[in-house]
Image (tube, helix red, strand yellow):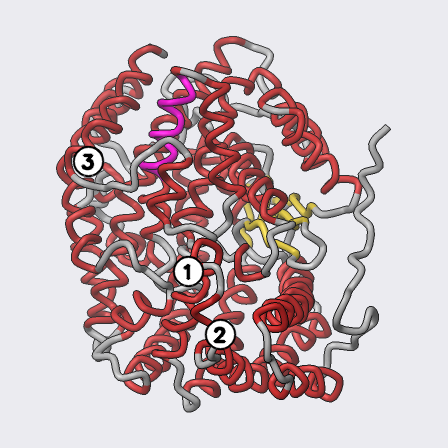
Amino acid sequence: MIDLIIPKKIRNYIPQALEMKWETLSPIFDELLNRKLETLTELEQWLKDKSELEAALEEDFAWRYIRMSCDTNNEKLVQDFQYFATEIEPKISPIANELNIKLVNHELVDELDPEKYFVYLRAIRKSLEIYRKENIELFTSLQVSQQKYQGISGAMSVHLNDQEYTLEQAATFLKDVTRQVREDAWKSIQQRRLVAKDELNTLFDELVATRHQVSLNAGFENFRDYMFQALGRFDYTAKDCYKFAEAIEKEVVPILAAQAEKRAEALGEEVLKPWDMEVNTSGKPALKPFSNGEELIDKTIICFNRIDPKLGEMLSTMKVNNLFDVESRKGKAPGGYNYPLAETGAPFIFMNSANSLRDLTTMVHEGGHAVHTFLTANLELNDFKHCPSEVAELASMSMELMSMDNWDVYFENGEDLIRAKREQLVDVLKTLPWVAVIDQFQHWIYTNPAHNAADREEAFKQIYTRFGAGFTNWEGLDKEFGNLWQKQLHLFEVPFYYIEYAIAQLGAIAIYKNYKENPELAIKQYLQALSLGYTKPMNEIYETAGIKFDFSVEYVKELASFIKDELAKLD
């Protein structure tokens, strides 16, 4: 029997029991900074030693973030996170910059294998270009302020039928066949969000102002242009994002508008309201693919095992090592994530399950990220594992679609299985306009940094309307309509991390198209692409996966038509 317990990593450079405080870290950084590197072998060993330190630091930070988000009410966990953000990270930043300078200025740097180090060195040089010492304090402030969103959102709950629910749990009522139940739940959720509206607007104003100052310090006109460089977007520009949005508006929005008309007719409603968009039009109760968090994990292991036994083993390893927290509860941060543990070589999956189909797709999505983490665990340098989001999300979104052929694990009833697949395919298309909304909204926010909360709300309404406004009627719901953006965690915590979902969604559709034609080849190419980490340029990684890195109008049309045809097969 395979032993799934993950052994503690043996360190070759830093102490095995290194205490993560500056007094113990400082001498190690000094040694790296002052070490003489006279041969290519010594330079490469220096890179490995630096990588070992970086992996240990990343994993320590990861656990602080994970534990805090699992219990936002625990002040000790919040303080542990803030200690790293305020006492360790600001001190590392300038020395890390000096280490980068030491590397790129070394006389032997050009003798490093370009096939192996090109992408890595390109990123290092870009980070040096935009580094400014005066931004260290601002990044510390942002790290602490961004975390406040979790605390505010994690405290949100509503009472329905004399029972308290987190907002994630309450959202399951939006699938109820009784319209009044859905309306009551939707309005309760939005009213609770409106209670925090001013507090979150004040927080966001502070974040925008600080981010804008970061960009000015680095010599940029606005934070948008700064982030395109900081995120290492070597393969596309802001202008490309606008063109992509236009393609989505032209090719995807009409398909979803037609789907909305069918929905209204099936529900017998003249107009669709926001609480009419999650209920199944069959008139049957919401799908229940599992009954609790443990069952969700176990069924997903079976599902992944069917795709490829290695994938099932990866999730089994996570379960044995307690690397899941999936149940929704009060005081837990909202959302879901896969957090790589850089030194251990495994990930942690965090989510807020309320036993819904959306939770199933969240699990297989984060499971795709988890597979990526395992496949890159043994890459030589820690930075080789730092994939751009367009690649990271390709891993997760492709898994959502490829796993569908094994969803009978969750749905024994054939009709339920068809319903689940149909909902998933519609959601794939729905992802694209929402991503376009959030992305275009961010472009507006940071190229208009002097705006106020009222300006921001009006801009969001205009952008959301352009992409269908959820394909519902918002009459009489103006406050709720203008405040919808506040539910998007990315806007507060990871600015400009969103267009990647649309780019990767297109790529995932292309992989799924290949999978329907040749499952074995598609899986093989998918795993080969993920195993590259970020050792190749993005377009080469996509090519290894058997697809194109392309988001032109023609490509959007081709892939949207494919999903439309797949939906027709389920009718």
Residue 550: give x, y in percent of width and height: 25, 41
Asked where in the image residue 5 lies, by quadrant, the reply is top right
Q: Name the element at disc 3.
A: helix
* Residue 532 is inside the magenta segment: no
The kind of residue tagged 1 is Phe
Callout in the foreground (3, 1):
1
Asked where in the image residue 479 lies, by quadrant, the reply is bottom left
Q: Is residue 72 visible?
A: no
The residues bearing labels 2 and 3 have C-alpha atoms spaced at a distance of 53 Å
Q: Which mark is residue 253?
A: 3
Q: Residue at x 62, y 68 (%)?
A: 41
User: How many marks are shown on the rendered structure?
Assistant: 3
Callout in the foreground (2, 3):
2
Magenta residues, as a range? 505-516
Depicted 64 relative to depicted 207: above or below: above
Query: Within 10 Å of the Cα at label 2, are there few (<14), some (14-19), or many (20+) other Cα atoms?
Result: some
Q: Which residue is mark 2?
A: 108
Q: Name the element at disc 2.
A: loop
Callout in the foreground (2, 1):
2
Tell me which numbered mark, 2 or 3, is placed earlier along the sequence. 2
Q: Which mark is residue 118?
A: 1
Q: Which mark is residue 221?
A: none
The kind of residue tagged 3 is Val
